[in-house]
Image: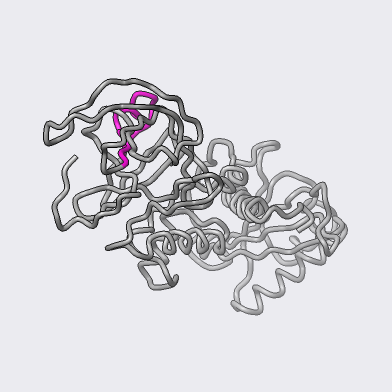
Amino acid sequence: MASSSSTPVDHEAWLIDSGASFHFTPYREWFYEYDKYDGGDIFLGDDRKARIVGHGKFKLKLQGGRVRTLLGVLHIPALARNLIFVSKLDDVGVKIVFKKDTCKMVWGALVLMQGVHIGTLYKLQGRTIIDGCNSSVVPKHGAENLVVFGEKTMLWHQRLGHVGEKGLLILHGNGMVEGISNFSMDFDFCESCVHGKHNRVSFPSGAKRAKRILELVHGDVFEPVLFPSLCKFVYYVLFIDDFSRNTWIYFFGKKSEFFDGFKEFNALVENQTEKKIKVFRIDNSGEFCKKEFKELYKKRGLARQKNTPYTPQQNGVAERMNRMLMEKARSMLSGVELGQEF
């Protein structure tokens, strides 16, 4: 490892290094598990010898509050820096990705840790846990607000219904979010997203898309939830305009209310747009196939398209919107540990 004299010096920082042979630290008090160990000598960059006197484990608290354990760390009192050896991580299947001004340590789809480029070095973002207290390992010079920026990035991610990194990047580029720097745009792992966004293989998009407003409207009913909401709702119905992707959501306590909800939606959109719904695409469930619905379709000259039974993929627009809404709801509830009635 080498650094120029202009690189900010932070003796408590963990440096991500490709030239070291193990994880190293000079700080005995940082270990939460420690064994004395005569590991012999290592040679430093100036050919001086440094003695290995122990080894053990570290706990690192990263952005978002996640705690990672760093195994196999050698204690070398003569060192001046803390080093994370990337090849040591690569041996256990962790992939190291260098992108722009960041370095990510990725295992599968999970971002384990992340570093930021400061001067000629990559420094870990996070905190070392010492006897229950946190010692900041974020550089004090050149990126003073790095942790604050990272926390604000996650805050916007949560505020916007756990929006993805790409979507947040677009909003940031358009000046629609505040307090985020370019350093922190690559936010890492969100455990609440994992809880809320498990899914099957994605549904394919339809072959054709409407060319005008209300030319095609998708409808779908979300089946009753186990726990009623605070307003005693157990169903919601989606209506999606295929052309604009504008979406309307109506909540209901009973299935008998669906018909009045559809009439309300139909009157609203036709009055606001001065156009009429041409085609209404639904699944093959019975909610939109009852007698009163059929009479309304006939009276208004509204064509109805139905899916093959048990094939929700044919109504992919509505199903994907259902998935997105439920992912956001589950992620937000998980993130603040609220019950399902919310």
Q: Quadrant of the N terminus?
A: top left
Q: Position of residue 167 (x, y in %)?
A: 44, 59
- Residue 321, position as x, y percentages in the image: 60, 53
* Location of residue 233 with respect to 124 vertically, above or below: below
Which picture quadrant has residue 182?
Answer: bottom left
Camera sees residue 304: no
Left or right: residue 86 versus residue 48 is right
At horizontal 37% and vertical 71% (from top left) the residue drawn is 174
Which residues are the magenta region?
A: 82-96
Relative image position of residue 134 (x, y in whole percent) = 49, 51
Position of residue 22 measured from the top left corner of the image (x, y, whole percent): 30, 29
Q: Name the colour scheme.
A: one colour
Q: Looking at the image, which residue is at 39% across and 24% down?
A: 92
> Relative to residue 10, is residue 31 drawn left or right?
right
Query: Between 338 and 147, which is closer to the camera in this rendering?
Result: 147
Q: Quadrant of the C terminus?
A: bottom right
Front-lying residue, 299 or 312: 312
Establish if 25 lies above or below 12.
above
Q: Does residue 85 show up magenta in the picture?
A: yes
The quadrant in which residue 95 appears is: top left
Q: Is residue 55 magenta?
A: no
Judge whether residue 162 can be spotted in this image.
Answer: yes
Residue at left offset 14%, top offset 55%: 5
Tell how many labels.
Answer: 0
